[in-house]
Amino acid sequence: MLTVEQNNELTQVGPGTPMGELLRRYWYPIAFEQDFDSVPSRSVRLLSEDWTLYKTPGGKFGIIQEQCAHRRASMTYGVVHEDGIRCGYHGWKYDFTGQCVEQPAEAENQNFKDRVKMKGGTAQTMGGMVWVYVGPDPAPELPRFDVFVKDGVRDVGYTTIPCNWLQIMENSVDPHHVEWLHGYYFNFVGETQGFEAPKAFQKRHIKTGFDEMEWGILKRRVLEGSTEEGDDWKIGHPLVFPFYMRVGGAYIDQMQIRVPIDDTHTWKLFYSTHNPGEQLDVQDRPVVYEYLWKDDEGRFITDYIEGQDIMAWVSQGPITDRTQEHLGRSDAGVALLRKMFKENMRKVANGEDPLGTIREKHEIINLPCEKDKFGAERTFAAAWINGGSMRYSPIKEQLLEMHESYWAGIEAAEKAGAGA
């Protein structure tokens, strides 16, 4: 149980708040590259602030606060130049740092522009997405986590969820919800609606573990019928601090991304790379799709994994009232995550780099992640694609065929070997 003040400290992401200052030390995906195929600029909201994200004719991206420092018109409707952006209202021009460099009607007041600077940030592309950093200089390196840069067939599901990002992150260190929400409850929904729920999620947790590591928290488990030699315990998968979770299994590598739009909205993405046993060429851009979580009557869609999660997150309210909660021993991961956030807020307040800050150039960061998910490697891909957000992917059938073809080849080779 937290106090109101403690809950506010953990959930408020605006400028000047302890959590907001911590979160501004990281890079965020805020758009897809294809969003700029027909327009040069878009309005985006990140960490409770409104921004204009723009692309120059030469392909460079920039980000600046949306409202012009002159008369507060939207910069999203400005003129994009190779070296910055010009407000459409009176022509004030800003460079990539947000510094005003031209004021056409103030030609006789040359020093005025030097005293005007808007908030700006740094923008880069990676994995078909546009990433931004809006914290203090010098900006850290954009982390090139494996899922975003490795070869394979990639698709990305996205939606905006009306709740605070922290209740989504706390779900990532709550393994017991899998056997109940995605197991017991999923089975109940299946019986009610006349379909068979995946069996992989219905196994009971015998043991769970949480280890602090260089990227966050490594989550491990032993399921009924398995041992500590299984991937789920021996390898596990990480909550990547502060807003990712890396998961995998059956040659699907996925990064779940929770971008804090503001205190009560989160942009939730599932970035998946499929590479079943062969080196597939990486696409120039991933296939992008929106997944659904409410039906036409406004009810939560709970016949798939992510829909069940969203029901649990959103039904807690826009911001969970943690003054009313009662944590038990099974919530050890949640307690550890809150401790980690508090420790890193203190680091930032002391002028230190928080956990996971990267200052060196690098090609790829390989994260630990199990392959034999829930001890069901051969059947897990189809269960995950059909029972998760990927069921909304426009290339769903292609993905199912690709994974099935791989496993059929393995089985044929095994049979041929047995008959030799």
Image (cartoon, rainbow, N blue to C red):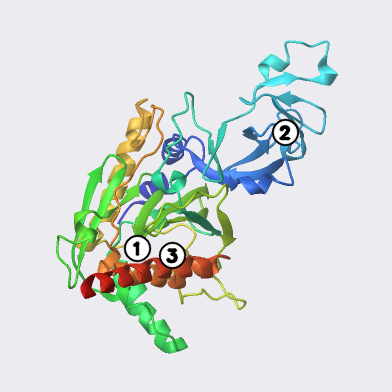
Q: Amino acid at mark 2?
A: Pro
Q: Nearer the viewer, residue 84 or 377?
A: 377
| 117 vs 275, nearest the viewer | 275
Is disc 2 placed on a helix, strand or loop? loop
| Residue 250 in the image, given as x and y percentages of width and height | 35, 63
Mark nearer the N terminus (3 vs 1): 1
The residue beneath circle 3 is 316
The residue that appears at 47% across and 23% down in the rendered structure is 138
Q: Position of residue 220 (x, y in %)?
A: 23, 57
Q: Quadrant of residue 381 in the image? A: bottom left
For the point 68% across and 15% down, which residue is it?
114
Q: Earlier in the sequence, mark 2 or mark 3?
A: 2
Q: Classify 10 Å Cα crowding around label 3: few (below 14), some (14-19), many (20 and above).
A: some
Q: Which residue is mark 2?
A: 57
Q: Which mark is residue 250?
A: 1
Image quarter where the N terminus lies is: bottom left
Quadrant of the rendered structure where residue 122 is? top right
**Residue 101, percent from left and from top:** 71, 19
Q: Is residue 262 visible?
A: no
| SS type, badge 1 | loop
Q: Quadrant of residue 36?
A: top right
Which one is closest to the eye, mark 2 or mark 3?
2
User: As shown in the figure, which amino acid type bears the numbered disc 3?
Assistant: Gln
Rendering coords of residue 219 (x, y %): 26, 54
Horizontally, residue 198 falls left or right of residue 43, namely left
At label 1, the amino acid type is: Ala
As drawn, 145 above or below 121: below
Q: CA distance from mark 2 to mark 3?
A: 44 Å
Q: Earlier in the sequence, mark 2 or mark 1?
A: 2
